Image (cartoon, rainbow, N blue to C red):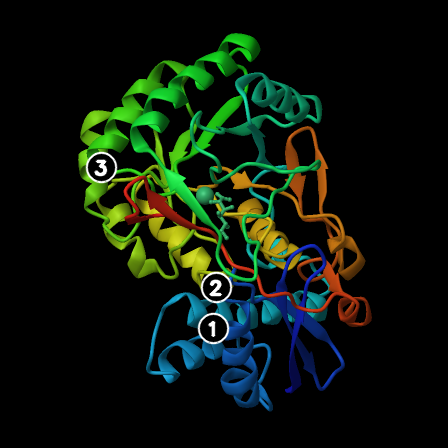
Amino acid sequence: MATITSAEVFVTCPGRNYVTLKITTSDGVTGIGDATLNGRELSVASYLRDHVCPTLIGKDPARIEQVWQYLYKGAYWRRGPVTMTAVAAVDVALWDIKGKVAGLPVYQLLGGAARDGVTVYGHASGNTVPELLDDVQRFLDKGFRAVRAQAAVPGLERVYGMRKGDGDTYEPADGELPTEEVWDTGAYLDFVPTYMSAVRERFGYDFHLLHDVHHRLSPIEAGRLGRSLEPYRLFWIEDPTPAEDQEAFRLIRQHTTTPLAVGEIFNSIWDCQHLITNRLIDYIRTSVSHAGGITHLRKIFSLAELYGVRSGSHGAGDLSPASLAAALHVDLSIPNFGMQEYMAHLPGYEEVFETSWRFEDGLMHPGDRPGIGVEFDEKAAERFPYERKYLPVNRLRDGSVHDW
Ligand code: CS2
Ligand code: MG
């Protein structure tokens, strides 16, 4: 039996901070997992280095479910973003190893491809409506069949989801200390339908249109937004209300047929049990790296399958390539796949992560390299030391702290 001989944690900042766990076995096989938690990176690095890695040495890397249970139940303190990101990193690294040992891409171990490719959505944004329209055009020209649209709200200086430079991704975390933004729900609610209407007017209905609300609304406000967007037939509105209150979605549902997606900040199946079993959402957007890895994500999606809820994995640029690759393997193999987010990564990442995925005609494929198909270059990683960065904090006009 092979055993785990080392578990090392790397923190690197090629464009943005990523935490990577690398596990090595006595047979010399290595596997990697993403342990990045945006703005709280070092806490996961410490959780792994100081508490998890020492316990992995000598364990059988093939017993993925047992290691998962050991880390989850064995810690006594369960769930939460730090714990579950750490567990996820171990889990994905072990799946990576299992694939390499078997000589198979992970999706083959999960049952094989249930579809030819994974439909992904890109992120279009603009400071003005014409700018947004140009950006939507850019994504359609690249072959995307699904586009998320976000525009700056007139009168507000900075709004989430806006790209600052060129490229396909944006980085919300900046500043040695958190920056602050100001929010106005009324202005937002009035403005969104005007630009969604402009998008449909210019490009028609032959592609999927999505929108992220980033937890900013109350349930009744979200109902109003969903209803006002019905003519534009959105694929989903994402995170309409703060996600802790699962029952709140019943009220939103009563007021709109716009599909609802939620889950990027969930860490476990318990965070979405009520939402799924009561059919209060249409898409569950948990991520592989924040919700316990491939092992746990598959359980969430299996529960969802039973209730007609489809997957919509989170895939922002602050999830490392190891995370996106792992998600693609899951997406390809499950029956109830819905949509995968593909925000891409900031330039620089490819010096540290070598990937095997491909994008063609709006679909992604993880590739057929054994394991998850991502290699991590430790030497290159050293050239990009960690930089402390925070996500912004959001306030209402009267100074109250609001959801970001
Ligand atoms: C966003 C994320 O991708 C999304 O849907 O909500 O970019 C989110 O802001 C970041 O992942 C936060 O780290
Ligand atoms: Mg989001």
The amino acid at mark 1 is: Glu
Point out the image quarter for the N terminus: bottom right
Label located before the other in sequence (1 or 2) = 1
Label located before the other in sequence (3 or 2) = 3
Q: Which residue is mark 1?
A: 65
Q: Position of residue 87 (x, y in %)?
A: 48, 72
Query: Which tag is nearer the camera, tag 3 or tag 1?
Result: 3
Q: Which residue is mark 2?
A: 295
Q: Is residue 210 positioned above or below 70 on the image?
A: above
Q: Which mark is residue 382?
A: none
Residue contact at pointers 1 and 2, CB within 8 angstroms: yes
Residue contact at pointers 3 and 1, CB within 8 angstroms: no
The amino acid at mark 3 is: Pro
Q: Which mark is residue 219?
A: 3
Q: Residues within 10 Å of mark 3 (few under 14, many from 20)?
A: many
User: At x 55% / y 27%, what residue is drawn?
Assistant: 127
User: At x 19% / y 38%, what residue is drawn?
Assistant: 250
- The foreground one among 271 and 61 is 271
Q: Is residue 214 left or right of residue 129?
A: left
Q: Position of residue 380 (x, y in %)?
A: 81, 66
- The foreground one among 50 and 389 is 389
Q: Position of residue 234 (x, y in %)?
A: 42, 24
Q: Residues within 10 Å of mark 2 (few under 14, many from 20)?
A: some
- The foreground one among 378 and 192 is 192
User: At x 30% / y 47%, what residue is drawn?
Assistant: 399
**Residue 278 visible in this rendered orientation of the protein:** yes
Structural distance between the alpha carbons of marks 3 and 2: 32 Å
Q: Secondary structure at mark 3?
A: helix
